[in-house]
Image (cartoon, rainbow, N blue to C red):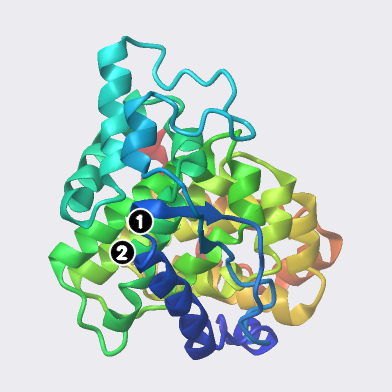
């Protein structure tokens, strides 16, 4: 079903990996004496229709290590968007603990533990996202955690330990993606494109499934904000064919999140018009939705069914799509196949 979109924008993952691995190698050399510079964009070839995720690192002569900056409580508070930020609206002890954890991200020997602790406690740090984004070299460190996993994707060699570690880094990026002060910066740096190789995997082992689901969570956090800029950005990338593939072949939970992302794209007028602009795009989406309905007759999932119905409902608001749905809407939505399932959830 997603082949149509794949033809429109076939990803050249090999070129993309070469670019981001190069960025990762730069980040690996950075240590605590490197400043992350966001916003410069590099092309990854014609396969990725938008600019490749940018974020390059540059040595800064005389710069102080992150640990030294944090020890004074400064943590880049003079950076744009950071003035007056109170990370937790709490006591000094809590602030110092947060600063220390962020500082530990810059050191290889303490990074894994810091990733775990920050990912577990991110809900208690309201302004963690601006601190992560504007602090010294932290974004480059998180991207390094991502790109170092690429060699394990094909052939599939991802272990549970490696999957858990990179998912902790992705959880922190999800925090950045959902925060109002960092969301636009996150998009301008094209960070979501670093996640697409994870979404493009097909292995059904638990480490890969966990990796795909966490990556989908980052994109889901973006679209949940109902921001047209987010939708406009995603439409310049391969997110729709990637989601369609997961909707066809993923686990129940991954299918649900991927369908939610497509639903949120459809709820935006630009997204609806984009998908309904050509018959090829429309039928790529409707065929996948139809196949999912067929599958739900054997393995019901009320939550997933609701997202699929909302997709169809939104498609019906486009005149051309409405005419097409008269002929291709699954029979199960006409009859009483799901009546009991929906009644039980009422």
Q: What element carries label 1?
A: helix
For the point 52% across and 40% down, the residue is 134
Pointer 1 and pointer 2: residues touching (CB < 8 Å)?
yes
Q: Residue lying furthest top in this view?
A: 91
Residue 333, quarter of the rendered image: bottom right
Residue 214 — which label? 1
Q: In which quarter of the image is the C terminus?
A: top left
Q: Position of residue 75 (x, y in %)?
A: 44, 32
Q: Total of numbered circles in the picture?
A: 2
For the point 63% across and 53% down, the residue is 187
For the residues labelled 1 and 2, the Cα–Cα distance comes to: 5 Å
Residue 280 — which label? none
Lateral position of residue 245 relative to residue 330, left or right: left
Q: Is residue 300 visible?
A: no
Q: Can residue 329 be seen in this view?
A: yes
Of 247 and 188, nearer the camera is 188
* Residue assigned mark 2: 211
Q: What element carries label 2?
A: helix
Q: Position of residue 82 (x, y in %)?
A: 57, 28
Q: Quadrant of the N terminus?
A: bottom right
Lateral position of residue 8 relative to residue 320, left or right: left
Lateral position of residue 41 relative to residue 182, left or right: right
Q: Where is residue 172 in the image (x, y as percent from the top left)?
A: 38, 45
Lateral position of residue 156 relative to residue 78, left or right: left
- For residue 53, above or below residue 9: above
Of 313 and 51, nearer the camera is 51
For the point 32% across and 60% down, the residue is 252
- For residue 222, above or below residue 197: above
Of 82 and 50, nearer the camera is 82
Q: How crowded is mark 2: few (under 14 residues within 10 Å), some or many (20 or more)?
A: many
Of 55 and 129, nearer the camera is 55
């Amino acid at each position: 079903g997603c082949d149509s979109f794949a033809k429109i924008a076939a990803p050249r993952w090999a070129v993309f990996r070469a670019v981001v691995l190069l960025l990762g190698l730069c980040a690996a050399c950075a240590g605590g004496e490197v400043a992350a510079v966001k916003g410069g964009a590099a092309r990854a070839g014609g396969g990725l229709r938008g600019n490749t995720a940018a974020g390059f690192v540059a040595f800064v002569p005389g710069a102080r290590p992150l640990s030294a900056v944090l020890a004074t409580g400064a943590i880049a508070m003079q950076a744009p968007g950071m003035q007056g930020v109170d990370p937790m609206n709490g006591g000094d002890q809590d602030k110092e603990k947060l600063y220390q954890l962020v500082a530990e991200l810059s050191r290889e020997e303490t990074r894994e533990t810091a990733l775990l602790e920050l990912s577990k406690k991110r809900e208690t740090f309201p302004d963690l996202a601006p601190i992560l984004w504007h602090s010294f070299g932290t974004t480059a460190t998180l991207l390094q955690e991502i790109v170092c996993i690429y060699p394990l994707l094909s052939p599939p060699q991802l272990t549970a330990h490696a999957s858990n570690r990179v998912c902790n880094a992705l959880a922190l990026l999800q925090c950045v993606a959902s925060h109002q002060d960092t969301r636009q910066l996150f998009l301008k740096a094209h960070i979501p494109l670093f996640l697409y190789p994870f979404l493009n995997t097909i292995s059904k082992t638990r480490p890969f499934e966990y990796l795909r689901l966490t990556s989908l969570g980052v994109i889901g956090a973006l679209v949940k904000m109902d921001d047209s800029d987010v939708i406009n950005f995603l439409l310049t990338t391969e997110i729709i064919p990637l989601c369609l593939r997961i909707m066809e072949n993923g686990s129940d939970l991954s299918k649900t999140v991927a369908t939610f992302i497509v639903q949120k794209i459809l709820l935006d007028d630009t997204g609806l018009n984009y998908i309904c602009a050509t018959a090829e795009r429309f039928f790529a989406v409707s065929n996948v939705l139809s196949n999912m309905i067929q599958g739900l007759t054997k393995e019901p999932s009320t939550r997933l069914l609701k997202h699929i119905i909302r997709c169809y409902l939104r498609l019906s608001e486009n005149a051309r799509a409405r005419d097409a749905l008269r002929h291709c809407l699954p029979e199960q939505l006409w009859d009483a196949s799901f009546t009991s399932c929906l009644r039980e959830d009422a």
